[in-house]
Image: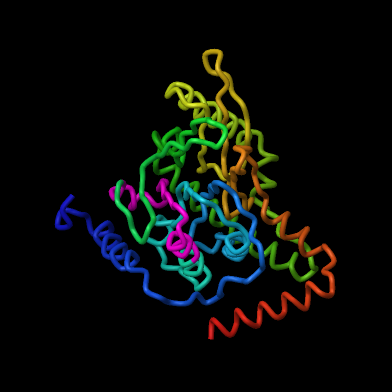
Amino acid sequence: MPKKDLPGDIEKFAALGANIASFPAIQPAVPERVIGERRKFRTIWISDVHLGTKGCNANLLIDFLDHTDSETMYLVGDIIDGWRLKKKVYWPASHNDIVWRILKRAKRGTRIVYIPGNHDEMVRPFAGMNFGGVEIARAAFHDTADGRRLMVLHGDEFDTIMLAHRWLAFFGDALYHAAMGLNLWVNAIRRRFGLPYWSLSKAAKHKVKNAVEFISKYEEVVARAAGERGVDGVVCGHIHTADMRDFQHEGETVQYYNDGDWVEGCNALVEHFDGRMEILHWAEEVAQRDAAPVPESASESASVEESAASREAA
């Protein structure tokens, strides 16, 4: 599509993409930590980061990116929240640090595939293009190490509310972000008492019958769509609920994976080098790490590494 035919918002994104592609040698506000050996995976899937909103749990995602690495990373939609940014610009340094880390991975040789969702739908017209080493696609197919073929997509295509009642989706989004604001206050109080991160909306979602029924129906519909396309499974996001389930379609098993989000659950889906799939609950991992006693020698080593990292950033 010629640039002159692009709508205003898309044209601005195209200009931004051209700048990103060159990836200038800038340093992030919070430099990557030198922590020794990172946890390595064959593939990582993350989605629903919602950069540009206060609900984005940027600090936990930065911690995740600093502790893990992979050959391939899929960004499975709603990475940037265009809906909220249209109403109010909110972009703290920590959100820039996340973008920086992702682009840095691409520079180091990680294959990055970005599949836009409904909140970052302004990116969809650029499917098939590459910005700063990040491939943009409407959907993708992934072959696991043990020979399974997985369809990868955001999943809003199967949300009946999004398809039939878009106005209701926007209304629900406003209520959701109000809940996220309350969640920030709740966790600020928890931090004062030395308690780990806890998601108010996630807990409420599991208590509300209608929400549970919607999630179950959504998972079933997405799995059936994957079965109809003849693949072994599907990876999606959209509903902010990390899960791994098997469904039956015409006598065949279809594996459903949802990589969760980085607003409520702070989850990632990973593939190990033998093809085994696992959901990482990063808030829990950080809480366990913080609770574990640190050997004196390791503490001294970490202090030296942090000082070196600080000198590099300076």
Give above or below for 91 relative to 216. Answer: below
Q: Is residue 122 magenta?
A: yes
The residue lying furthest to the top in this view is 251
The x and y percentages for residue 212 are 63, 34
Going 27% across and 63% down the picture, which residue do you hit?
12
The x and y percentages for residue 211 are 61, 37
Q: Is residue 242 magenta?
A: no
Q: Is residue 164 left or right of residue 28?
A: left
- Nearer the observer, 74 or 42: 42
Q: Is residue 202 visible?
A: yes
The x and y percentages for residue 242 are 61, 42
The x and y percentages for residue 197 are 71, 59
- Nearer the observer, 168 or 53: 53
Going 58% across and 64% down the picture, which residue do you hit?
62
What is the span of residues highlighted in magenta in the rendered image?
A: 101-127
Q: Is residue 87 left or right of residue 314?
A: left
- Nearer the observer, 175 or 248: 248
Going 66% across and 38% down the picture, which residue do you hit?
208
Going 36% across and 42% down the picture, which residue do you hit?
138
Q: Quadrant of residue 290?
A: bottom right
